[in-house]
Image (spheres, grey):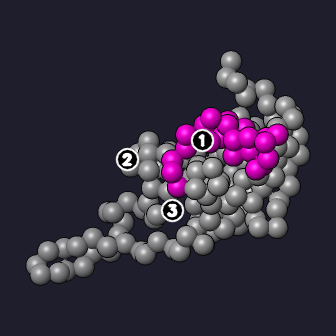
């Protein structure tokens, strides 16, 4: 059994800054900032299962991009990615069964399902010694650690 297999959120509150505060059934507390949640998106695209991780960039297939002629070559261009401030804005959240949340981001990204087990595993803690970051949070990608203040 995984360490946090049976842990669930016992209270979830939105913070004034748009982040999420979670109290867990094991007594731990987590404060997830929007940039940290986006950097830790568990979807296949963001985690690199379909190639290099593409968190915070437009991951539409190049084939769908308009083509330009430049010096006799066709150059593939796509839409400019939105600013990070838009990409990390949470536009909505939907429950996924009893096991997690689906977050809808400002740039339209919505394929990551944040299971309770995943969120508890990557908990950045709440900034106090009583609720420290998990090992997975301490070992996250540098931009995610920076977003969590770890």
Residue depicted at 82% across the width and 40% down the height: 130
Magenta region: which residues? 118-143
**Number of other residues with Cα within 10 Å of mark 2, as a class: few under 14, some 14 to 19, many 20 or more:** few
Please tell me which residue is depicted at 72% across the width and 53% down the height of the picture.
32
From the viewer's perspective, is 135 left or right of 72?
right
Quadrant location of the N terminus?
top right
Q: Is residue 124 magenta?
A: yes
Residue tagged 3: 56
Local SS, label 1: helix
Can the viewer see residue 129?
yes
Q: Return the x and y of residue 150 as percentages of the image width and height.
A: 63, 50
Q: Which residue is mark 1?
A: 138
Return the disc, 2 or 1, that comes first in the chain's sequence: 2
Secondary structure at badge 2 equals: loop
Q: Is residue 79 above or below residue 47?
A: below
x, y percentage for residue 41? 58, 50
First of labels 3, 1 by sequence position: 3
> x, y (%) of residue 28?
82, 38
Reading the image, the residue beneath label 2 is: 51
Q: What type of secondary structure mainly makes up the magenta span? A: loop
**In front: mark 2 or mark 1?**
1
Alpha carbon separation for disc pair 2 and 3:
15 Å
């Amino acid at each position: 059994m995984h360490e946090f297999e049976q842990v669930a959120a016992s209270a979830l509150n939105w913070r004034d800054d748009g982040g999420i505060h979670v109290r867990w059934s094991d007594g731990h507390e987590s404060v997830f900032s929007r940039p940290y949640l986006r950097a830790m998106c568990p979807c296949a695209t963001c985690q690199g299962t379909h190639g290099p991780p593409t968190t915070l960039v437009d991951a539409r297939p190049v084939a769908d991009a308009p083509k330009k002629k430049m010096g006799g070559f066709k150059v593939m261009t796509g839409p400019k990615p939105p600013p990070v401030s838009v990409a990390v804005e949470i536009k909505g959240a939907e429950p996924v069964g009893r096991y997690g949340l689906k977050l809808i981001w400002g740039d339209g990204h919505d394929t990551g399902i944040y299971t309770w087990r995943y969120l508890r595993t990557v908990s950045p803690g709440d900034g106090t010694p009583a609720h420290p970051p998990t090992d997975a949070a301490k070992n996250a990608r540098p931009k995610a650690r920076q977003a969590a203040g770890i």
